[in-house]
Amino acid sequence: MTSTEAPLTSSSRTCLAIVLAAGEGTRMKSDRPKVLHQVAGRSMLGHVLAAVTAAGASNVAVVIGSDREDVANETQKTLAGARIFVQRERLGTAHAVLSAREALEQGADDVIVAFADTPLVTAETFARLRAPLSEGAAVVALGFEAENPTGYGRFITEGDRILAIREHKDASETERAITLCNGGLMALRGDTARAVLEKIGNANAQGEYYLTDAVAIARELGHPTAFVVVPEEEVHGINDRMQLAAAERMMQDRLRRAAMLSGVTLIAPETVFFSHDTKLGRDVVVEPHVVFGPGVVVEQGVVIHGFSHLEGARIAAGAGIGPFARLRPGAAIGPKAKVGNFVEIKNTDLGARAKVSHLTYLGDASVGAEANIGAGTITCNYDGFNKYRTEIGAGAFVGSNSALVAPVTIGKGAFVGSGSVITENIPDDALGLGRGRQTVKEGWAVGFREQALAAKNARKK
Ligand code: UD1
Ligand code: CA
């Protein structure tokens, strides 16, 4: 249900993507750079890198501000081959693009310019933006019909041709009435890109080098230009936390729709939150109020009951999870296994048809097929310094309220008496019992009641 990772263009044209990530982001009021804030479990920058790659960019340049090692690290982590360029002074979008001059000089056929703070643009849109380049356009702009155009650049068009983009601050009253606005992103033909970009000056209201001037300059040089229109929500840029939340809403809507279209039942889709990489098989049912963190793969026919939280987990076909289950990274749930309410599982393999039905913590463990883990079982996997493993064999039966002190092995078909603290290995088919022995005192309660009542009456006098 993720957006397709395979290149969308069959053309043999090479493509360079220049991703502008030098934003200041002061309105986020954050210690973290704006483009590293997350949408659906992935940084905005990560979304943009994925989209341009899926649109066929085999060469990616990321333009960052000075001293932004964190942005450089995220870039390397997401896309190892990407090159980093630093824009030392923020002199405008065209200046930012030219900060990656060395990448431009490598001579790609197509150049796409993306903004790292505009994470909802799809790979399909980047591919649409590239398409007119192969038909001769030197510059392709991305427009949208703005509900409120204030602040955006306006498209000056003539029929289906675009003549220029006018920034809001430079626009006349008549131009300000135009509602077809600039989304900011652009595609340029590689063989003319540098000539066009280097002609851009900064004689405008903001004294900035505007990328938007590329349209008028291309025309002056006699090159054709084109534009593509997308819905406004797709070019939603993020400057503050409200806009971040709006982007999350739109991204979640996309993920929910994709899940349902691929054969997943969401009973109350608006209450289910996905990660960008959540993978759900056919006929999975997700009940209300379920949250998916990154790295979850769910095979077909699984039911995830309400109020469950899953992250870094694999769930095999036909398993049942929750309600109120928590699966943490490294949880691997076998086919038709059952994980019930108030169960937490981390770094543990649960075998086929095994059952962990209530109130249990399994960490750093492996549980064989058809084992039954009783209510209140805890693997004591950590001594404050190191973690240890618990191995539970196939068909074992762990009685309720047992503490399994790792490292420890419980053999195949073995039993653990309930209430045990197990510190030693239990062989196959054996019984392990580790608890105080029960004593029974006949008639004890009668004497107790007499004494207690007498003491109470003595106090009242
Ligand atoms: C830009 C467009 C405008 C469009 C709007 C859409 C220009 C001149 N204007 O305006 O037509 O309607 O986007 O949101 O392109 N950046 C740098 N270095 C710089 C300046 C900007 O990296 O020196 C990056 C920013 O981090 C941001 C992007 O470029 O990701 C756009 O810059 P921003 O200042 O937000 O441009 P707008 O004024 O919004
Ligand atoms: Ca902006």
Image: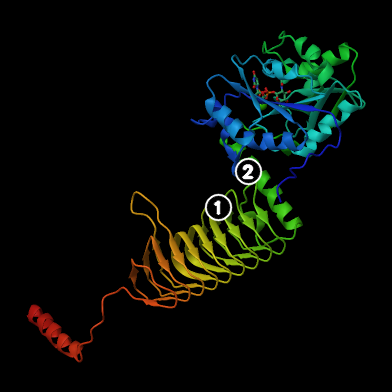
Q: Nearer the viewer, residue 15 or 255?
A: 15
Secondary structure type for disc 2:
helix
* Residue 172 seen in this snapshot: no
State yes or no: Cβ of the residue under disc 1 lies below 8 Å from any atom of ligand 1.
Answer: no
> Which quadrant is home to the C terminus?
bottom left
Where is 331 relative to 241, above or below? Answer: below
Picture mark count: 2
User: Would residue 133 be found to the left or right of residue 205 on screen?
Assistant: right
Q: Quadrant of ligand 1?
A: top right
Q: Nearer the viewer, residue 388 or 324?
A: 388
User: Would residue 164 be found to the left or right of residue 272 on screen?
Assistant: right
Q: Amino acid at mark 2?
A: Glu
Give the image quarter of residue 238. Answer: top right
User: Would residue 338 be found to the left or right of residue 2 on screen?
Assistant: left
* Residue 351 seen in this snapshot: yes
Residue 272 percent location from the top left of the image? 62, 55
Q: Residue at x 61, y 52 (%)?
A: 273
Tags 2 and 1 touching, CB below 8 Å = no
Label placed on residue 248: 2
Give the image quarter of residue 458. Answer: bottom left
Residue 256 percent location from the top left of the image? 69, 53
- Label 2 vs label 1, nearer the camera: 1
Give the image quarter of residue 316. Answer: bottom right
Residue 357 percent location from the top left of the image? 50, 71
Where is 381 relative to 444, above or below? Answer: above
Secondary structure type for disc 1:
loop
Where is 337 relative to 218, above or below? Answer: below
Q: Residue at x 58, y 27 (%)?
A: 72
Where is 322 relative to 249, above or below? Answer: below
Q: Amino acid at mark 1?
A: Glu
Name the residue beneath numbered marker 1: 311
